[in-house]
Image: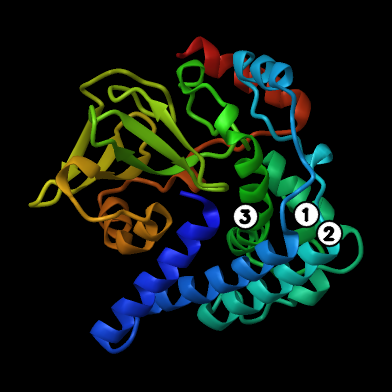
Amino acid sequence: MTTANMDKKILKKLEALEKKEGALAGPLDFYRKLLSIQLDTKRHTGKPRFSLSPETINERINAGRPLLEFDKLPVDWSLFEDTFKKIGALFASYSRDGAGTDWKQLSAGSSLKEAARAWFEGAPPSFLMAESNANTTLWEHVIQAAFNPFLVAYRDSIYSQVNQEYWRRSYCPVCGGSPDFAFLDKERGSRYLVCSRCDTEWIFQRLACPFCGTQNQSSLTYFSDDKGLYRLYVCDECQCYLKAIDLRQTEDEILMPLERFFTLDLDIQAQEKGYKPVAKARDRVGAEEGREDQYKKANINQ
């Protein structure tokens, strides 16, 4: 399914749910407005002039390096700035933490591009935070939401060339992001991870933690709902959790990005048990020179 079709189906599903329920719950209403902003950005972006040769793709996949590099992304920074301001205002209207944030100030001049670079490469945004009162976590959420339409466009242009059998790592083969959701496929119950940044899906072993890599089964477990549809994977070594859906247990069409919001109660349950969401639990990738060491370590752990 193309990204455009996915987005349209999500909006139709939310519209149908609103007619049925009378009004959307706060998080779903927020997501609908966020998706509308992102869709508008995708329309203006169009098909990006971005491609990688099969040789480059194979070389990077075999070396355990994600395909996208920040400096080589043809981002329309004017469009990104406009998207950032709109999404910042949306977050501010739904979050107390964002109410006092001057999103126009944060997007002024070249600082926004450097902020995006810091987020993409996992560097702390200390230089940005010193100039504003923005909440660090909120800032990252806004940057991620604003960058998503661009990452998804680049992903669509190269993802079909990724050989899944050569990538069973804990980070996204396209952008290097962490997973925040997973699913078990209908055919064999294989587990696929879903990137929190660009929604790329990739296969990963069932009996291992996708965050710390442990295969110690006494540290790994999962909780399931009464129908066996949803799972909450937890690891007692790194204290991370991962939400998942078992597609073998449903005949309905599942729209994976929407499932993040349908399962917010699982986040609450996990955090009440003392587990941390991935964004806070996983060490962020540092500067480019530190990236290589992390990727090599990840390869050793496979």
Looking at the image, residue 74 sits to the left or right of residue 299; the answer is right
Looking at the image, residue 68 sits to the left or right of residue 79; the answer is left
Residue 72 percent location from the top left of the image:
82, 38
Question: Up-down: is 84 above or below 299?
Answer: below
Q: Earlier along the polypeptide chain: callout 2 or callout 3?
A: 2
* Amino acid type of the residue that numbered disc 1 sits on in the rendered structure: Ala
Question: Up-down: is 186 above or below 84?
Answer: above
Q: Residue furthest left?
A: 226
Dot 3 alpha-carbon crowd within 10 angstroms: few under 14, some 14 to 19, many 20 or more: some
Structural distance between the alpha carbons of marks 1 and 3: 15 Å
| Label 2 sits on residue | 77
Could one spot residue 174 in this view of the protein?
yes
Structural distance between the alpha carbons of marks 2 and 3: 13 Å
Within the image, what quadrant is residue 190 found in? top left
Q: Nearer the viewer, residue 36 or 294?
A: 36
| Label 3 sits on residue | 148
Q: Nearer the viewer, residue 272 or 263?
A: 263
Q: Residue at x 47, y 74 (%)?
A: 32
Q: Residue furthest bottom?
A: 22
